[in-house]
Image: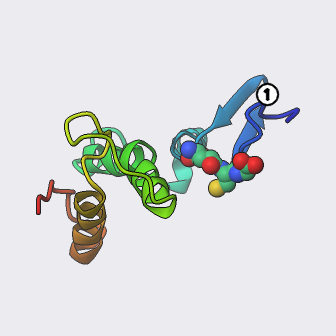
């Protein structure tokens, strides 16, 4: 709680900065250590798809999985941050099948 008042992990304290949210931590560390080559660099055609995947994790995948695990009805399609669980899972699954060097594409059932 002293590090993250929300009581959630992961959390990183770096100097005065508090960074929470997995995606933010990954980006922060990659930017901090650019020579490690942890992410596609700015200007790399894979940078956009990479950021999309990263943000998708927190904004869509995580809420979809938690709603499913808790057996909660998702919000109506037009109001749900992820649409529906099956589409969200298919988007991840299709990308994994394509491999790491291919750009992410939107998939619809
Ligand atoms: N959206 C957050 C999720 C953080 C989260 O839910 N962390 C869980 C572990 S996976 C946690 O700290 N649970 C302990 C608790 O809430 O007491 C992220 O991406 O980092």
Q: Is residue 9 visible?
A: no
Q: Where the C terminus falls, by quadrant?
A: bottom left
Residue 3 in the image, given as x and y percentages of width and height: 83, 34
Q: Which residue is mark 1?
A: 15
Front residue of this view, candidates 36 and 46: 46
Residue 71 in the image, given as x and y percentages of width and height: 46, 60
Q: Residue at x 34, y 39 (%)?
A: 42
Q: Is residue 83 visible?
A: yes
Front residue of this view, candidates 84 and 106: 84
Front residue of this view, candidates 45 and 109: 109
Please determine whether, in this image, residue 42 is positioned above or below residue 53.
above
Image check: 35 left or right of 47? Answer: right
> Within the image, what quadrant is residue 5 found in?
top right
Q: Residue at x 88, y 32 (%)?
A: 2
Farthest residue toward the top? 16
Image check: 57 left or right of 102? Answer: right
Q: Residue at x 39, y 53 (%)?
A: 64
């Amino acid at each position: 709680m002293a590090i993250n008042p929300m009581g959630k992990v992961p959390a990183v304290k770096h100097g005065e900065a508090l960074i929470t949210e997995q995606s933010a931590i990954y980006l922060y560390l990659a930017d901090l250590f650019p020579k490690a080559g942890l992410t596609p660099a700015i200007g790399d055609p894979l940078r956009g798809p990479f950021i999309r995947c990263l943000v998708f994790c927190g904004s869509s995948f995580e809420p979809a999985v938690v709603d499913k695990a808790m057996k909660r009805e998702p919000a109506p399609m037009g109001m749900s941050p992820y649409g529906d669980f099956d589409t969200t899972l298919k988007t991840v699954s299709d990308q994994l099948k394509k491999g790491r060097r291919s750009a992410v594409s939107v998939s619809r059932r």
